[in-house]
Amino acid sequence: MSSKCSSHSNPIFRSHPMASLLVAPPFNFAFRSVVFLVIIWIGLFCIVEISAGGDVGEVLGKGGHKQREFDYFKLSLQWPGTVCHRTRHCCSSNGCCRGSNAPTGFTIHGLWPDYNDGTWPACCNGKRFDVKEISTLLGALNKFWPSLSCSSPSNCHGGKGLFWEHEWEKHGTCASSVVGDEYKYFLTTLNIYFKYNITEVLREAGYVASNSEKYPLGGIISAIQNAFHTTPELECSGDAVEELRLCFDKNFKPRDCAVDSNTESGIVTSKKSCPRYVSLPDYVSLNVGKNDAEVSQATVHSSI
Ligand code: U2P
């Protein structure tokens, strides 16, 4: 018996590109279910990534999941003259907005435990940041580890908070086997930053903040190699140096950073790559008020 409803006899089913979906209901259902599940899975993955401030290379440990022990430290510094250039409006928590008290040399971004394969753990033990634990360090932190933005970065618990909260919860909790608790994470980072004074090394080599000079990238790298026997990692925004990173083994002896896929003999080739000649822009600070440094300190104290 020939059926008039047979797909073979119906020209619509034969010619329409979606015909195969229409003629095979069980397959159609299974296929749609798979697509649906894949979409849900991708969505959930994105939510977790975004809420932890995820980046390529990050091994997530939301909820304090155990992650493998890290291999080395990366001290990441930011050049305010470049970062602050993005400031469109001011607020008291933004170090760029301190008028004549705005930072002029490299400030701390974070001390990051990293893996040799170019990835890093994040959000490790589920502990929460408590600003009271670092109350005695706030003067130094405001000066040398300021936020250079008005936005509140994510913490590891689905919320937002201070820049220090983001750095400690995301990175510091993964370094506790070596550095210890929250207070020690900040103290250790400040000490390393003071000991390996990149701004000073560059100044001595003649590389100072300027809005007119361009410096050879090779010269900057050599100055640091000569001073600390290690090769820094550099990131730029255009030709302006934005970040400079120094790596250390777990005894805080300088070592080279893991070669990431974007790096080729010290010259980074990603979109943040530095050209052969770079600048160290001088920042003309926006001003939130006449006593900006105090405003910033007060902001932190009031949240204790
Ligand atoms: O480079 C973009 C962001 O990725 C995170 N990062 C990068 C390199 C690395 O070795 N470790 C690491 O964590 C940083 O994220 P943040 O701490 O700012 O959230 C970096 O800014």
Image: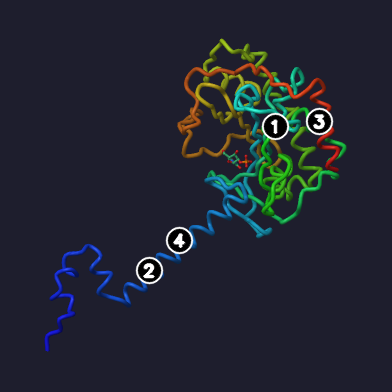
* Residue hosting label 3: 140
Q: Who is closer to the viewer here, 25 or 300?
A: 25
**Residue that label 2 marks:** 32
- In 3D space, how far apart are the residues under numbered discs 4 and 3 (Cα atoms)? 46 Å
Mark 4: amino acid: Ile
| Residue 108 disc label | 1
Q: In the rendered structure, which disc, 1 or 3, sits on the residue that comes first in sequence?
A: 1
Type of the residue with mark 2: Arg
Toward which corner of the image does residue 235 lie, by quadrant? top right
Q: Residue at x 81, y 47 (%)?
A: 130
Residue depicted at 17% across the width and 79% down the height: 6
The quarter of the image that holds ligand 1 is top right
Measured Cα–Cα span from mark 1 to mark 4: 39 Å
Q: Residue at x 87, y 37 (%)?
A: 136
Of pointers 1 and 4, the one earlier in the residue sequence: 4
Q: Image check: 270 left or right of 128?
A: left
Amino acid, disc 1: Ile
**Circle 1 — which element?**
strand
- Residue 39 is marked as 4
